[in-house]
């Protein structure tokens, strides 16, 4: 709200201004009651006005007035001296110029227009200054046996469900030091208790994870909380009020004008959704710093039923989080670790994709997340669409030419078979058999070698089957799937933050060199497949 000086002069001449409180039913409360009143000094009210904002409010109007004045001045001059005078002066000047200068003039004009078009479409690069992942305390870490003890002490699972959970856990690819929040593991300290799924316990988990990674990220980058301009938090299954963004801003005392966004319900691929949102905001706001926080909350999301399609979440998901600091300042490019090259998002719209990861209640009213048994195939089809869009940005030209040749050959053979009525089952003549041997009825699809355009891979650690399936379909070597298997074994499926545990492994163990490209691939509910390509800016 903008308060004008005239409205201030019209206020009472009393030294203080009293505003009556409005009750929840819309009626005005009695000002003489014992309820608190909002009082503010008139001098302080004037100081609260943002005069720069007031001036900028009239800036477009002033610009329009200036434009109209100049247009009227030009029109008056043309009427005064006559419309033919400028034309004659221009023709005289053109006749006096040499042809070479005229040729150079139109070329220079065209070059200038192209330069203006390029600058208008050019965006400042987005730099990843640094990122930090959450390292759970020792008290949060559980062995498989302790995890199964937690399940048994919930006193809600049947013997068949316990055996199923143990069998799935043994095949999950997770290690013996993955983390669960204290709200769930309190039954290990007191077997008379079950999981604490209260809002306060869930908020405590989020505060512990988020505040730890944010503080570590700010400290390692030398960034003050007041330097943050954009704040994005993604947490799919826990969206309290006040929001997690408000929690961070309150805890670290950030500025009041921070652009804050809280994302929920986006699944395990939400981190790259947050990165893309930060990229879009940074494009329209130069010289800004963005902080992206990715996490998930498990306290309120332990399934207490016996539906096998919903029991899987109890064996896969673990606590985790990551904080990523982005910037579009040119001077930050010298200290940044990576530069964002491309983000591609693919969203499935079919019923099968929509129900692949579905939050619901079972027949007994127990809340949980149902995972489709065909989720690996759904993820594969969604990834295929995503990589079809991503391919031209990362594949070398030779691979793209071969892909185009294969597609053209497939369409040509299909067209010829239809025109010549060639069918392997019904064709018996010698001519048709000869044509079939020369024109194949089915051309195998060519899977491009993405290893030629990507040096390091961060595949979402959604489970052993997901990692192995992606590696097999893309023909990856064991070293390419190593970061994903490391994150899955040591941290479990930490949802949206898993790709940052993998990126951390790539940086510390595989050590990418300057100019290498890292690909992050994440899958999420909906069903989504998001990918991001980063260019390494540091290294020998």
Image (cartoon, helix red, strand yellow):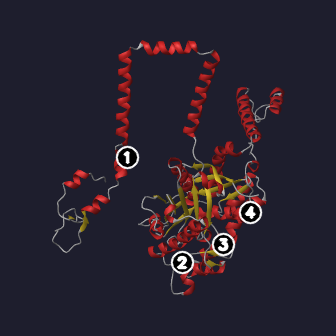
Q: Is residue 74 above or below residue 286?
A: above
Mark 2 / mark 3, whichever is N-terminal: 3
Distance between mark 2 and mark 3 Cα atoms? 17 Å
Asked if the residues shown at circle 4 and circle 1 are in contact, with their CB atoms under 8 angstroms apart, the answer is no
Residue 523 in the image, given as x and y percentages of width and height: 61, 56
Determine the secondary structure under disc 3. helix
Distance between mark 1 and mark 3 Cα atoms? 61 Å
Please name the residue that numbered disc 3 is placed on. 169
Distance between mark 4 and mark 2 Cα atoms? 30 Å
Q: Is residue 418 above or below residue 476?
A: above
Categorize mark 3 by other alpha carbons within 10 Å: few (<14), some (14-19), many (20+).
some
Residue 184 bears which disc, if any?
2
Which is closer to the viewer, label 4 or label 1?
A: 1
Which is closer to the viewer, label 3 or label 4?
A: 4
Mark 1 / mark 3, whichever is N-terminal: 1
Which is closer to the viewer, label 1 or label 3?
A: 1
Please name the residue that numbered disc 1 is placed on. 56
Distance between mark 3 and mark 4 Cα atoms? 20 Å
Determine the secondary structure under disc 4. helix
Categorize mark 4 by other alpha carbons within 10 Å: few (<14), some (14-19), many (20+).
many
Residue 161 bears which disc, if any?
none
């Amino acid at each position: 709200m903008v308060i004008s000086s005239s409205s201030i002069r019209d206020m009472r001449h009393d030294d203080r201004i009293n505003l009556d409180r409005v009750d929840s039913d819309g009626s005005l409360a009695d000002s003489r009651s014992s309820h608190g009143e909002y009082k503010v000094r008139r001098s302080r009210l004037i100081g609260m006005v943002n005069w720069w904002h007031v001036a900028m409010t009239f800036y477009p109007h002033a610009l329009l007035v200036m434009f109209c004045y100049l247009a009227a001045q030009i029109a008056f001059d043309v009427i005064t001296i006559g419309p033919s005078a400028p034309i004659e002066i221009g023709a005289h000047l053109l006749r006096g110029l040499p042809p070479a200068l005229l040729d150079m003039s139109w070329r220079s004009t065209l070059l200038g227009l192209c330069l203006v078009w390029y600058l208008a479409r050019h965006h400042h690069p987005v730099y990843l200054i640094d990122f930090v992942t959450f390292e759970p305390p020792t008290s949060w870490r559980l062995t498989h046996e302790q995890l199964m003890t937690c399940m048994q002490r919930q006193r809600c699972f049947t013997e068949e469900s316990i055996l199923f959970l143990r069998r799935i856990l043994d095949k999950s690819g997770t290690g013996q030091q993955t983390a669960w929040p204290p709200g769930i593991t309190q039954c290990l300290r007191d077997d008379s208790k079950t999981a604490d799924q209260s809002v306060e316990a869930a908020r405590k988990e989020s505060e512990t994870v988020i505040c730890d990674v944010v503080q570590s990220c700010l400290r390692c980058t030398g960034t003050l909380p007041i330097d943050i301009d954009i704040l994005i938090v993604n947490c799919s299954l826990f969206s309290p009020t006040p929001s997690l963004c408000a929690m961070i801003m309150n805890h670290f005392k950030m500025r009041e004008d921070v652009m804050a966004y809280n994302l929920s319900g986006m699944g395990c691929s939400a981190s790259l959704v947050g990165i893309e949102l930060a990229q879009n905001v940074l494009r329209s706001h130069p010289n800004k710093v963005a902080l992206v926080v990715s996490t998930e909350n498990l306290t309120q999301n332990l399934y207490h039923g016996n539906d096998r399609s919903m029991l899987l979440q109890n064996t896969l998901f673990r606590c985790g989080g990551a904080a990523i600091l982005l910037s579009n300042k040119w001077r930050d490019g010298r200290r940044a670790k990576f530069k964002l090259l491309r983000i591609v998002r693919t969203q499935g719209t079919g019923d099968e994709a929509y129900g692949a990861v579905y939050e619901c209640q079972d027949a007994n009213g127990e809340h949980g997340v149902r995972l489709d048994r065909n989720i690996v195939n759904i993820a594969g089809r969604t990834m295929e669409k995503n990589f079809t869009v991503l391919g031209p940005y990362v594949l070398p030209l030779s691979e793209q030419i071969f892909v185009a040749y294969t597609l053209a050959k497939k369409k040509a053979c299909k067209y010829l078979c239809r025109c010549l009525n060639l069918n392997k089952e019904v064709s018996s003549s010698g001519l048709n058999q000869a044509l079939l041997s020369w024109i194949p009825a089915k051309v195998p699809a060519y899977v491009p070698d993405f290893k030629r355009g990507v040096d390091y891979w961060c595949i979402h650690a959604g489970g052993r089957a997901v990692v192995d399936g992606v590696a097999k379909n893309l023909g990856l070597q064991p070293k390419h799937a190593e970061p994903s298997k490391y994150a899955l074994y040591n941290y479990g499926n930490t949802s949206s933050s898993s790709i940052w545990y993998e990126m951390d492994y790539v940086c510390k163990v595989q050590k990418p060199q300057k100019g290498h490209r890292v690909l992050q691939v994440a899958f999420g509910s909906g069903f989504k497949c998001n990918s991001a390509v980063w260019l390494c800016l540091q290294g020998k």
